[in-house]
Amino acid sequence: MVAEKIDQCMKPHGEEGIATIERMNENHKDISEFAFKCVNVNENDKILDIGCGGGVNIEKFLKLTDNNVDGLDYSDVSVAESIKRNKKAVDEKRCCVIQADVSAMPLDSESYDLATAFETIYFWPQIENTFKEVLRIIKPNGRFMIAQGTDGNHPDDEKWLNTVEGMSVYTAEELEKYLLNAGFTSVKTVKKENDYIMVVIAEKKLNHHK
């Protein structure tokens, strides 16, 4: 009998979903800390955290910019938890968290300086097309940062793929190819020393033509 795959990671839901988000907040700390060292945030950057989970990274970004930090997630539980964690910023209209699908975001084109995706692209559909959608909402000279706990060579990748519903794992080379094909003009990868943690930063240059 094949064990039922875990579906809470892709879309946390119900009471168990809240517990999953709390675990993710804890388990992803190292990835988040490394990613924040890899990206320069300007004080007037408008930021969107895609797949915002429990809103921990929204909270961190709000301390680094005077502009808005918004969140988007497929899960209603994640959206509720993100709003709760960042209630003051939400009340002050500095943060808006919406439930939506990353492959069709109800957001204006060229509206964010920085888009981020922490431990989430594993679940994105048709990854190259979804990257095109991220490119659309980023301003010229804007950036897209992907942060994840595996560079595609983690010894546990196979186990995760077998147990977590809807999951795909990508190497740095694969991500670079998909991002450039989607229209980003440059891609830089940083890997944490003696670890599998990887941060990929793609840029959309000013002379980008649609």
Image: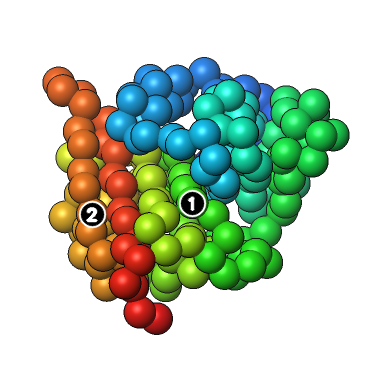
Quarter residue 194 falls in = top left
Task: Note whether 152 is above or below 193 in the view shown.
Answer: below
The residues bearing labels 2 and 1 have C-alpha atoms spaced at a distance of 16 Å
Depth check, mark 2 against mark 1: the one in front is: 1
Task: Note whether 208 is above or below 72 in the view shown.
Answer: below
* Residue 31 seen in this snapshot: no
Secondary structure at numbered mark 1: strand
Q: How crowded is mark 1: few (under 14 residues within 10 Å), some or many (20 or more)?
A: many
Quarter residue 93 falls in = top right
Q: Is residue 114 left or right of residue 78?
A: left
Residue 128, x across and y down, in percent: 36, 69
**Quarter placement of the C terminus:** bottom left
Which residue was labeled with disc 1? 113
Q: Do the residues labelled 2 and 1 touch (CB within 8 Å)?
A: no
* Residue 192 seen in this snapshot: yes
**Rendering colour mode:** rainbow
Seen at 58% across and 24% down, the residue is 63
- Of pointers 2 and 1, the one earlier in the residue sequence: 1
Residue 75, x across and y down, in percent: 68, 48
Seen at 38% across and 58% down, the residue is 141
Q: Is residue 95 left or right of residue 124?
A: right
Residue 39, x across and y down, in percent: 35, 35
Seen at 31% across and 47% down, the residue is 201
The amino acid type, in three-letter code, at marker 2 is Val
Mark drawn on residue 15: none
Seen at 54% across and 54% down, the residue is 112
Which residue was labeled with disc 2? 187
